Amino acid sequence: EDKVVQSPLSLVVHEGDTVTLNCSYEVTNFRSLLWYKQEKKAPTFLFMLTSSGIEKKSGRLSSILDKKELFSILNITATQTGDSAIYLCAVARGSTLGRLYFGRGTQLTVWP
Amino acid sequence: DVKVTQSSRYLVKRTGEKVFLECVQDMDHENMFWYRQDPGLGLRLIYFSYDVKMKEKGDIPEGYSVSREKKERFSLILESASTNQTSMYLCASSSPGSSGANVLTFGAGSRLTVL
């Protein structure tokens, strides 16, 4: 059975802290790994990773994939209250018409 | 701005009622998906469609059906709502071709409560 496991499931930090969110996976025919951010409404796309060792960056967020060890991390530096959200990790397999397999998400709360 | 629009943000229905959740996308996407999201369980795929009139079961299709009569519209139907279908329902779409198929664009969600 395919699995996507995120840890921790919840995390509370103070503004300015740096956080690392983890996502491990066991899927057949891996194609790509995606990160989404979900505040009160629709999940919004952050990154898609297909190759090991290539860091993707967007402002204070960055992510990297390790296809040998089957995991990805999402880093957020200098956290702000606006980073409070559920962070979703999802994996795509080849030839599955675009469907994604999601982890349970990490609920991040950033206190001022 | 491209969008996936779900017709109802909040619905309250009674056990046994038939429920329609509508989703419309304006991006000319071929693929459309219905997920449900429950605390602690993440997003679970109910049904998806890769073309008009085509549908595929996801991981939890029991108690649900779908309809895709037009490319832009994907409807989720609960034939006889039950309390265990109380949940947040998320619609999404994507377009195939290189890596585009895997980048889903989500609607804002429909929170359904079944009493």
Image (tube, rainbow, N blue to C red):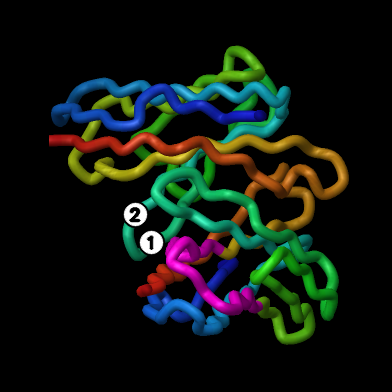
Where residue A52 sits in the image (x, y, percent)?
83, 77
Q: Which mark is residue B41?
A: 1
Q: Quadrant of the C terminus of chain A?
A: bottom left
Range of magenta residues = A73-88
Q: Is residue B72 magenta?
A: no
Chain letter for mark 1? B
Q: Amino acid at mark 2?
A: Asp
Vertical placement of residue A77 versus B49, above or below:
below
Q: Is residue A109 visible?
A: yes
Where residue A84 sits in the image (x, y, percent)?
43, 65
Q: Is residue A85 magenta?
A: yes
Label 1 crowd bin: few (<14), some (14–19), many (20+), radius 10 Å: few
Q: Is residue A25 left or right of residue A64?
A: left
Residue ID at (62%, 40%): B105
| Contact? badges 2 and 1 (CB < 8 Å) | yes
In which image quadrant can residue A27 be found? bottom right
Between B45 and A81, which is closer to the camera in this rendering?
A81
3D distance between C-alphas at marks 2 and 1: 5 Å
Q: Which mark is residue A66?
A: none
Residue ID at (55%, 22%): B24
Q: Which residue in the protein does label 2 denote?
A: B38
Residue ID at (30%, 44%): B87
Q: Quadrant of the N terminus of chain A?
A: bottom right
In which image quadrant can residue B21 be found? top left
Where residue B48 sits in the image (x, y, percent)?
58, 36
Q: Amino acid at mark 1?
A: Leu
Label 2: which secondary element: strand
Residue ID at (72%, 42%): A97
Tally of numbered discs: 2
Vertical placement of residue A110 versus B29, above or below:
below
